[in-house]
Amino acid sequence: MADLEKGSKKLLNAWAFYDWANSVYTLTIASAVFPIFYEALFSEQDHYIDVFGLHLKNSALISFVTATAFLVVAIISPLLSGIADYVGNKKAFMKFFCYLGALSCMGLYWFNLEHIYVGLVFYFFGLIGYWGSLVFYNSYLPDIAFVEQQDKISAKGYSLGYVGSVILLIINLAMIMKPKLFGISGTDGEAAMKAMRYSFVMVGVWWVLFSQYSYYFLPKGNKNSDRKVTHHVVYNGFKELKKVWLLLNVNIPLKRYLGSFFVSSMAVQTLMLVATYFGAQEINWSSKEEGTVGLIICILLIQLVAVLGAVLTSRASAKFGNIPTLISINCFWVLLCAGAYFITKPLEFYIMAGFVGLVMGGIQSLSRSTYSKLLPKTDDTASFFSFYDVAEKIGIVIGMLVYGIIDQITGSPRLAIVFLGLFFVLGVILLNRVPKKGVLNP
């Protein structure tokens, strides 16, 4: 079909609907069901396994694999986005990573300790597929929406993603709690594990199926299919990052803010990725069934409260300013990390999940908008946000490595989370060095 006009309602809705398609990955695979499934596999092995010639704790192992995947994404994102923008085939790239991620999710059905390497490969490429597709999905926004439409349609995409992912997670939770009602045979434990495996397949199918609506209406790209890819084009993305790095030397407020964002985001993103593993290992659930249901409920609670947190943070920044609000949120994160060392009971974990959701949504939304306010007057905002994205991914790599190493050495994720709290302390120190005048005032 002919390309729809920029700004058309049908095109905007098609773009936003990809959030509905892919957000099931973050909730079911990254946050809820897979971490519980992964922990259950090790229930009779005291959380350790011999892999890659090492005797590793399971949560440390998954941290290292996750860190490696994010490192790959950080490296290939500028390279591939540069090629896609030049040649004009970003939809083809987006499809490739979407299908890679979806098929990898389906492959997790066969994840077991006897063939751990195969399972880890599926997990690894699931991460690559999800984050890789987001690079091209996000880059479509200025192509399909006018400036005055972008905030609204971006928020709509977030809302669709939240609703879609919660719907599928509730279905998965029902399957896990009552597998017999869904025709899943076996003992209670075996049937629950089968239900989790089926949920991985459902994520892949959901992702591929619903993404087709977006692909049908989204344009191919910038209509430059006759252009040839040269080595100059391949490295263009990295040249853009270098250009932003050099510009930071003359924009001190932005440079100082990026330093604080780097260390605080490092801790936030890591905590989000490991929260379920911590809850599965360190909370005294009365039974496996209570633990499974309780952890999924906590994830849903975090998702719900995060929306409220984003709204409250936006209001606080309007009244008190961006930097003071971010300083307060980082201080609260320090308290949460310290408190995590002492919690052992399910009720304590639920309360902690509520507080985490409150500041998780707030710090993410305010961090990005503060960065946007500090940007110099330029038409090349894509390069600055590419730099922001790469900084975030490298931060996750470091955060996951720090968590995994401490968890492996000490045998306890509690000390690792307390250590991550130090990154928030450093973030507060760096934020205090950012000038609070001008655009950051209420």
Image (cartoon, rainbow, N blue to C red):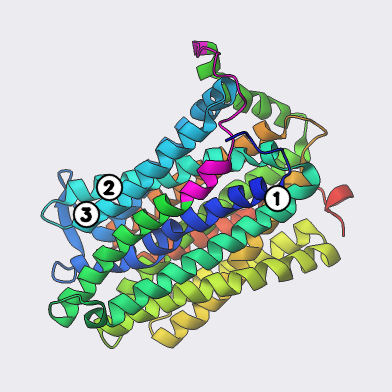
- Residue 29: x and y in percent read 37, 59
227 inside magenta stretch: yes
- Occupied quadrant, residue 308: bottom right
* Callout in the foreground (2, 1): 1
Most prominent secondary structure in the magenta stretch?
loop
**Mark positioned earlier in the residue sequence (3 or 1):** 1
Residue farthest left in this picture? 114
> Which corner quadrant holds the N terminus?
top right
176 versus 65 height, above or below: below
| The magenta segment | 211-231
Q: Nearer the viewer, residue 23 or 20?
A: 20
Q: Considering only vertical position in the picture, is 21 above or below 310?
A: above
Q: Is residue 136 above or below residue 404?
A: above
Magenta run includes residue 173: no
> In which quadrant of the rendered image does the C terminus lie?
bottom right
Which disc, if any, is residue 122?
2
Q: Is residue 71 visible?
A: no
Q: Marks 2 and 1, Cα distance to the nearest angstrom? A: 37 Å
Query: Three-letter amino acid code at disc 1?
Result: Lys
The percent position of residue 209, horizontal first and vertical second, equals 41, 53
- List the residue tagged with mark 3: 56
Q: Amino acid at mark 2?
A: Phe
Few, some or many residues within 10 Å of mark 2 (<14, 14–19, 20+): many
